[in-house]
Image: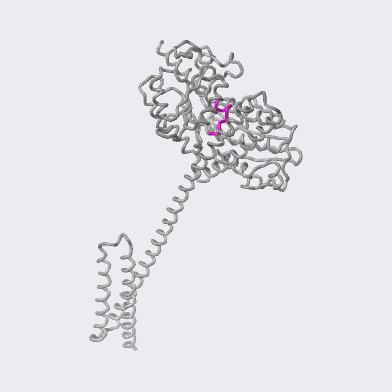
Amino acid sequence: MIQYIIVGLIIFGSALMVINIIGFVRYARFIRSRENWSRGHGILYIPIALLCMFLVGYLVVGIFGSPDLIVAGILFGGSIFVFIMMLLLNRITQRIIESEHLEAELKAAEESNRAKNAFLASISHEMRTPMNVILGLDELALKNEDLSEETRMQLVKIGRSGRHLLSLINNTLDMQAIETGKRSLKLNPFSLREMMGQIEAIIRTICEEKGLRYHADVSSGIRDGLVGDDMLIRQVLLNLLDNAVKYTAAPGDVTLLVEKVSADTEGCVLRFIVRDTGIGISPEFLPKVFELFSQEDTSFTNRYGGSGMGLAVAKQQVELMSGEISVTSKQGEGTSFTVVIPLVFAGDENTEAGRKQAEGTEGDSVSEKKDAEGEPKEEGPDKNADSAEEGSALKKYRILIVEDVDENAEIVTDLLELEGAKVEHAENGLIALGMVERSLPDYYDAILMDLRMPVMDGLEAAAGIRALERPDAKRIPIIALTANAFEIDVENTTKAGMNAHLVKPIDSELLYATLEKWIRKTQEDNYRERKEKGL
């Protein structure tokens, strides 16, 4: 009986060793096919040679020897061990192959995502450029007081449709940026009062066009100087307010309230309430209102417009700021959106009022300015704050527009000249750099810089201006005015030394406010520096 067991172990061991040899030969061929094993693959055949010698030893012992049960068991165990090692090796190889496949798929997905982002950036720029011309010319045309009522209404409808198309572009890009993690928080000191003023300038005009009343109020006890992503907050509120205007018929009311939920020594939690007296939302649809592409009734889309993206984007933006958004509504009576956002207090020196209070100068500071011929004269930085007439908010400021598209340059020029500014134009960054280099110190009060231009782009031009060996090169406000709207574009303009980033199509009120803010700040900083030096 024992002899039969010994023979059986020898036979099965030999057969298993043949299987092992075949398996290792296949494995060696597979490894040789890999690109990184095109050389030095001779080592793969050493295990095969050893296994063949092991098999020969099996046969010699089985045929010519007299193996006992222990020897046969050892030989059979060796075959089992090699077989298990081969299975383990194949398993490891399979996992490596699967990992490589996943890595290849991930790389392909990343390449696809980069291509998509490049496409979105390109199409965004290409769409914003003509939109800038359309909305800019529409706004300029509406300023003509001699228009017939029919023509005025047609222009209003053109502007309304253009802004709707722009909102679709913005919502698509904002959602894509948040979902891919390319939109991060940009925490900056900002003035709540200033932000509310910018929002009111935009929404009140839209409400008046539609025959609606706009109300805005900030509760007492809320500090003006805050730290947060003011651009994102402004986008959320404008999105909700635009929605309120869209679904409210004249005569009706649109209201924006700001309330303090809580506060401590470090910051506060603010509640923004956007309320309207519009058509309202049914109780059945309320839970779905923040879902992407959700719409209560397709007939509303035909009547009021909308893509079902705005509220979904607003929710993503609020959550990015660690805030919350909610809605209450009653059909036929109106809707109320509530946004709660935590913010940090800024130092008083970070706000305009705080800076003036800290300096003890409420508008009587003096800085050097020049008249139209470029000669210096003494004027205070607040020369337009109290005595400016309508249409002269930027009076006597000289602004350089750097823009390669003539239509865009003409629109910005007309908008600035309506406010009393003196405007010069450069067709690309290289020309602008030369104009600044050849000008007298403080000749230009601000520069509006496009980004995509031939010869020299806006980023190179801004960096070149900042590097000039002249006293005003570091302080002159350079404001990006571009169709490039991605987060990376804002980061690039900041790295290049620009002070602010405005996106086309141009919001004239925001353009004016941004210019006034940075020109005023530059004048005050310049005056403070001169005062400290005793000049």
Compared across the picture, whether 269 is left or right of 380 comes to: right
Give the total number of marks visible in the rendering.
0
| Picture quadrant where residue 168 is located | top right
The answer to whether residue 511 is magenta is yes
Q: In which quarter of the image is residue 217?
A: top right
* Quadrant assignment for the N terminus: bottom left
Q: Where is residue 240 in the image (x, y as percent from the top left)?
A: 64, 37
Picture quadrant of residue 495: top left
Extreme-bottom residue of the structure: 1
Q: Give the range drawn in magenta.
A: 504-512
Q: Which residue lies furthest to the right in this view?
A: 332
Residue located 26% across and 69% down the image: 45
Could you tell me residue 254's position as x and y percent?
Answer: 69, 32
In magenta segment, residue 15: no
Position of residue 410 measured from the top left corner of the image (x, y, whole percent): 53, 27
The percent position of residue 322, horizontal first and vertical second, equals 56, 39
Coloring scheme used: one colour
Q: In this view, does 270 lie to the left or right of 530?
A: right
Task: Tell me what residue is drawn at x 27 percent, y 72 percent.
Answer: 48
348 and 314: which one is in front?
Answer: 314
Report whether 377 appears left or right of 75. Answer: right
Q: 260 or 339: nearer the eye? A: 339
Quadrant of the frame with the C terminus: top left
Q: In this view, does 78 lie above or below 43?
A: below
